[in-house]
C-alpha cells in the first residue's frame, strides 16, 4: 500500500511541468501566451523594465519570477544596455540546462553572438512549432534534473 502511494506521488511530481517566463516589454509584439500555455506549462509574464519600472533582477540581484522559471523566452532589444544586462543575469541566475529563447532584431544575432551563446535565437516572431519545441526543451531539462 505505501509503495503504491509512493509510485503514485512520483507520477504526479513527474507530470508537473516547469514554468516558462515570457519577458516581452511593452511596445514589442508579444509571444502568443496561448501557444506557450498550450504546451501545458504554466506561464508567467513580465513586461520588462520601463520608464517607471525597474528590473528587480538588476536592482536587487533577484527576481521572484526568474526564480520560478524553468525556461525563459524574451524579446528584448539587445541594442539597449539594460536589456543586455538582463540577459547576462538570466544566464548567470538560471541553472545551466534551463533553456533561454530570444527573439532578436535582424543583425543582433551576429552583433551579440558572444552574449547569445547558449541561447535559442529567433530573428523573427517564433512560430507555434518553435515555441512548442522550446517548451519541449524546458520539459527535457526538467526531466534531466
Image: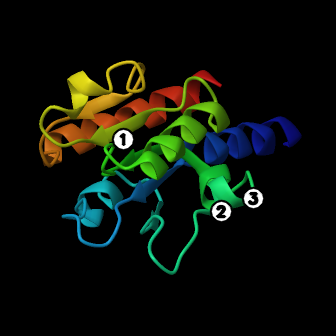
Q: Position of residue 3 (x, y in %)?
A: 83, 35
User: What element does badge 3 sit on?
Assistant: loop
* Quarter occupied by the N terminus: top right
The Cα atoms of the two marked residues, 2 and 3, are separated by 5 Å
Q: Residues within 10 Å of mark 3 (few under 14, many from 20)?
A: few
Q: Residue at x 12, y 43 (%)?
A: 124
Please tell me which residue is depicted at 45% across the width and 76% down the height of the picture: 51
Between residue 118 and residue 16, name the one nearer to us: 118
Residue that badge 1 annotates: 135
The residue beneath circle 3 is 60
Element under disc 2: helix
Q: Where residue 20 sits in the image (x, y, percent)? A: 46, 51
Q: Are marks 2 and 3 in contact (CB under 8 Å)?
A: yes
Q: Nearer the viewer, residue 38 or 87?
A: 87
The residue positioned farthest toward the right in the image shown:
2
Callout 3–callout 1 Cβ contact below 8 Å: no
Amino acid at each position: 500500500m505505501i509503495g503504491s502511494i509512493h509510485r503514485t506521488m512520483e507520477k504526479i511530481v513527474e507530470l508537473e511541468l516547469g514554468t516558462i517566463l515570457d519577458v516581452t516589454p511593452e511596445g514589442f509584439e508579444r509571444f502568443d501566451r496561448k501557444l506557450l500555455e498550450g504546451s501545458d506549462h504554466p506561464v508567467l509574464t513580465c513586461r520588462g523594465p520601463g520608464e517607471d519600472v525597474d528590473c528587480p533582477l538588476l536592482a536587487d540581484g533577484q527576481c521572484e519570477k526568474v526564480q520560478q522559471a524553468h525556461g525563459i523566452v524574451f524579446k528584448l532589444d539587445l541594442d539597449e544596455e539594460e536589456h543586455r544586462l538582463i540577459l547576462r543575469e538570466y544566464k548567470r541566475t538560471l541553472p545551466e540546462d534551463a533553456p533561454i529563447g530570444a527573439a532578436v532584431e535582424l543583425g543582433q544575432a551576429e552583433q551579440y553572438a558572444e552574449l547569445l551563446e547558449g541561447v535559442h535565437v529567433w530573428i523573427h516572431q517564433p512560430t507555434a512549432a518553435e515555441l512548442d519545441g522550446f517548451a519541449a526543451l524546458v520539459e527535457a531539462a526538467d526531466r534531466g534534473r
